[in-house]
Image (cartoon, rainbow, N blue to C red):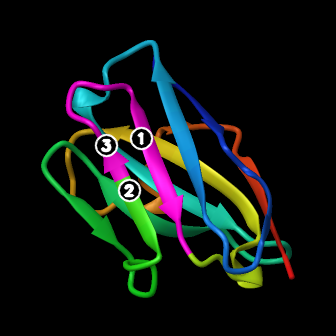
Amino acid sequence: QLQLVESGGGSVESGGSLRLSCVASGNSLEWYSVGWFRQAPGKEREGISCTSDEFTNYRPGFEGRFTVSRAKGQNTVYLSINNVEPEDTGRYYCAARMGSGDICYLSSMDHWGGGTLVTVSS
């Protein structure tokens, strides 16, 4: 089965940038849609983006500072965050589901990584 592992989190100053990685193993991402999600302290988990080889969609408010990269034929999906804000603090997850639907509904994702923590300081 598919396994996902996130990395790249850490402490970053407000206004800085970082890039998170989601590495897949056990199967090819060619057959999956991959979503990025985050959960701030005390908040519910929210979606950031949904991507496949054919498309990348962002939730309103995320496009611009957040950029998803998914190289064709590769097993890694990246999330770059520019000009980070304290409100970006939280645990970031990648998740996958079979198929290429253009929206990654939180409840529809079948495979989840353990997340990587991002802490924005000022």
Query: Where in the figure is residue 13, as x and y percent of width and height?
Result: 79, 72
Q: What amino acid does circle 3 point to? A: Arg
Left or right: residue 48 versus residue 42 is left
Which residue has dot 2 on it? 68
Which residue has dot 3 on it? 70
The one of 53 and 11 positioned closer to us in this rendering: 11
Which residue has dot 1 on it? 77
- Secondary structure at numbered mark 3: strand
- Residue in view at x 29 percent, y 63 percent: 103
Query: Is there a contact, CB below 8 Å, between mark 2 and mark 3?
Result: yes
- Residue in view at x 47 percent, y 76 percent: 65
Q: CA distance from mark 1 to mark 2?
A: 7 Å
- Residue in view at x 45 percent, y 12 percent: 26
Left or right: residue 30 versus residue 113 is left
Give residue 121's quadrant in the image: bottom right
Query: Is there a contact, CB below 8 Å, between mark 1 and mark 3?
Result: yes
Q: Residue furthest left?
A: 54
- Secondary structure at numbered mark 1: strand
Q: What amino acid does circle 2 point to? A: Val
Query: Where in the figure is residue 32, as x and y percent of width and height?
Result: 29, 36
Q: What amino acid does circle 1 point to? A: Val
In the rendered structure, which segment of residues is drawn in magenta? 69-82
Left or right: residue 43 versus residue 101 is right
Q: CA distance from mark 2 to mark 3?
A: 7 Å
Q: Is residue 27 above or below residue 57?
A: above
Query: Is there a contact, CB below 8 Å, between mark 1 and mark 2?
Result: yes
- Secondary structure at numbered mark 2: strand
Query: Where in the figure is residue 92, as x and y percent of width and height?
Result: 65, 56
The image shows a total of numbered marks equal to 3
Identify the image quadrant of the C terminus.
bottom right
